[in-house]
Image (cartoon, helix red, strand yellow):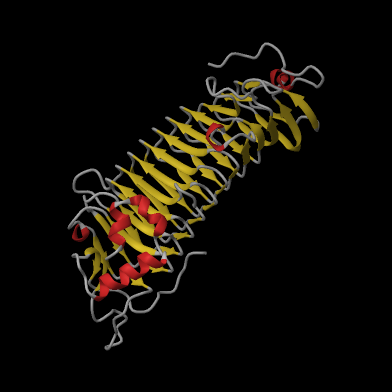
Amino acid sequence: KALRPAAPNRTDIPWFQTLVDEAPPGSVLKPPPGDYAGPVLVDKPLIIDGGGKVTIDGGGKGTVFVLDAKGATLRGLHLKGSGDSHDSDDACLNVRGDHHVVEGIVIDDCLFGIDLKQANHNVIRENRISSKPFDLGVRGDGLRLWYSNHNLIEKNEVIDSRDMVAWYANHNTYRGNIGKRSRYSIHFMFAKDSVVEGNSFYDNAVGVYLMYTERIHLRNNIISHATGATGMGLGFKESSDSEIENNEIIYCAIGVGSDLSPFEPDTTIHFKNNRFAFNGIAIRFTSDLGGNVLTNNIFEGNLTDVVQMGRGASEKNQWHGNFFADYQGFDRNGDGIGDTPYELYSYADQIWIETPAAQFFKTSPVLELLDFLERLAPFSSPELQLRDRAPRFAKPERTAKS
């Protein structure tokens, strides 16, 4: 159990701990509007409702608020002013225990935002979180789950933070959240059986990254403007058995980057009804394991739709019914399916695929001319990147927002 703080970090304003100590277990605490000092420990079931008019200031030391009980509710508070130590994980709000509701909390000037450790069946809803104004790599995580399961993370805004992280945290749902100007919108590591739906992630280095993770369901999300040298909308590292459905992945340096995924034998990763548009590379497979199944996706406006690393690996992934804006076939019988397969070959592109530094010159006049000559009279065997035997002829209607 967490220890009760010995003294407030600021002496010029009332100590919020005093109000907590006086409140009977199970009661509703509605403090008078104003500024209060932290740190605070709640170790009994309480409903604390600040009505949006209560600020608790940690004074720049340690963690501002610790919730270590069962079945408590925090609502309508402004938490600010944690310390800046990564060694002690200084945060605005530490959540321990189960069945809490944390909603309508504004968090700023904190290293870490909301930190759940061994906390299960909690609801984290409609909170606004930002970090201290540090360089990206030394900010704290806006929202972190560690060994925490069956939590609902809903309608939060995590902006100018570092990551949303799920470590060894299973069966969690991320729904309707907004992530902006951070590093990873969500980073799963050894985290399984979770749902990510209806979120909007903009201007982050990476949208969602799945590392050593299984059975993640991503659907109806928008991931855009993951740009820069490491920009990636959706990433996989040795992950397996997931479904990626009805997402918009747009304006990213790399839409999907997949490394050794699916990793577990006899598993698949399904990409269904997604739109990949205006990315540098829509999908890049950096291994030749195969096991990816792509159906009814839209590819339009990308500099390169697909890059498949590994010689002869293109047939290990399954492509069916996808729409490619640059398809050059016909649909004579009007069934909506192209008469001939869609095949994507790399010609001069093989130069920068095999030598990544050469990608700097992609679309330059010399490489464009070389690519034209290669297609006209190949002097080396072009590499097949994908073959879709039943490509869609007309662009399907979208149901996802964009």
Residue at 63% in and 25% down: 65
Residue 93 vertical position relative to residue 254 in the rendered view, above or below: above
Residue 74 vertical position relative to residue 65 in the rendered view, above or below: below
Q: Quadrant of residue 187?
A: top left
Q: Quadrant of residue 381?
A: bottom left
Residue at 29% in and 42% down: 238
Residue at 44% in and 37% down: 166
Q: Is residue 336 rendered to the left or right of residue 114?
A: left
Q: How many marks?
A: 0
Query: Residue 98, how many percent across, how many down?
Result: 50, 30
Q: Is residue 331 rendered to the left or right of residue 191?
A: left
Query: Residue 200, how many percent across, how many down?
Result: 53, 53
Residue 318 vertical position relative to residue 76 in the rendered view, above or below: below
Query: Residue 116, how many percent across, how many down?
Result: 51, 30
Residue 390 versus residue 102: which sits nearer the camera?
390
Q: Is residue 93 rendered to the left or right of residue 223?
A: right
Q: Could one spot residue 240 in this view of the protein?
A: yes
